[in-house]
Image: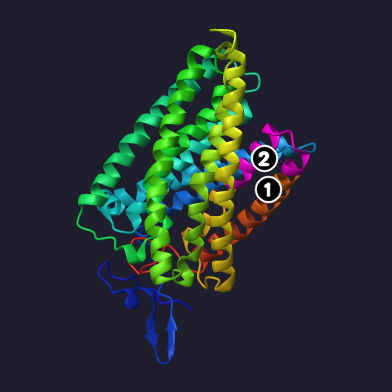
Amino acid sequence: MFESHPIPPGSSRSDASMLDSGFEKRPVYLTLSERLRHFTWAWYTLTMSAGGLALLLGSQPNTFPGLQEIGLAVYLINLLLFAVVCSAMAARFVLHGGMLDSLRHEREGIFFPTFWLSIATIISGLYRYFGADAAPPFWIALEVLFWIYCACTLVAAVVQYSFLFGGPHSYRLQTAMPGWILPAFPVMLSGTIASVIAEQQPARSALPIIVAGTTFQGLGFSISFMMYAHYIGRLMESGLPCREHRPGMFIAVGPPAFTALALVGMAQSLPRDFQLVGDEDALLDGRVLQLLAIAVGVFLWAVSLWFFCIAAIAVLRSPPTAFHLSWWAMVFPNTGFTLATISLGNAMSSAGVRGVGSAMSVAIVGMFLFVFVSHVRAVVRKDIMYPGKDEDVLD
């Protein structure tokens, strides 16, 4: 049984989560409005993961009848989830205010970029599921969305890091985590979007998109690489994070994996016009760029593999005991790792590498279902969307 009276907004963490009754501590009943107070930006980790899964299902090298339809269904369900999450976030701010406070929060604000990561998967999925027989206006719309995304994510990365560098919060190096990469993650995925949509764009649009994608992919990966220095330094000096935060270690898998995916994809998407105009060596130049992208992609794939193994061993040694939205880090970055594997297999025409990519895809689907069920159960059991248990508090 639950107590029927709500918790005052200023209640302490222990008071908010439990009520003493003799020797028992029982969860306090909260109205939906009060629970929405704790609906945080980290919920977009759900939609970015579902969008990434849809993109992965639509990119399989080894397919079977109905797989594209399953992928399309996941993509459409993700659009519905995205609308629900956006509506819930809007309801939170309408009912309780504090939007700017949430963006400036030391912990919750770090998750704001997951909104843009969800947008990136939606844009990429538009091409994957609706671009096969699309008319020219569709390609123009994708081009416009790409440039708007680049501009917004660049501004977001500059503004958020400027606040982190000059704001009131102090992020000690002894607590460095891959989550510090998140503000640079969305602008980095400009390259991933470019690698997807440039394939069918006319040369007039494809070349600027690929150049911009390479530019912003390089920016995001360079920022990530600098953050890696602090993260690895922290691991050497202070050891592994506590067990509840270890799923977030998988975030480090993402930047090199998505960079490998973007470079290989953009090199493969170079328009034919690029290879035919100019001097007699133009065709050779295009092939050299493709080979260079594959070589760099393999190099970065190995970096992702190393980060994946480190994170997997850490989580298996000491699994988390309570669900947190950071568990979705076990899905989305690893989806990029799997997509990079498939892209490299296609570029090298290797059936073995493509088979590994398909096996990894099965594992990603299984992990997605596990985390999704855990997510739903956590909401029902009041393990999240509850005072003191979400990213709007420090732990």
Indicate left or right for 304 with 369 as reference: left
SS type, badge 2? helix
Residue in view at x 57 percent, y 19 percent: 285
Query: Magenta residues, as a range?
Result: 337-354
Q: Are marks 1 and 2 in contact (CB under 8 Å)?
A: yes
- Looking at the image, residue 127 lies above or below residue 107: above
Quarter of the picture containing the C terminus is bottom left
**Amino acid carrying mark 1 in the image:** Ser
**Which numbered disc flags the more N-terminal residue, 1 or 2?**
2
Give, as a three-letter code, the residue at label 2: Ile
How is the structure coloured here? rainbow
Q: Residue at x 60, y 37 (%)?
A: 295
Foreground residue, 343 or 382? 343
Q: Is residue 381 visible?
A: yes
Is residue 122 shown left or right of residue 216? right
The residue tagged 1 is 361
Q: Position of residue 158 (x, y in %)?
A: 29, 40
> Which residue is disc 2 drawn over?
342
Residue at horizontal 32%, vertical 77%? 15
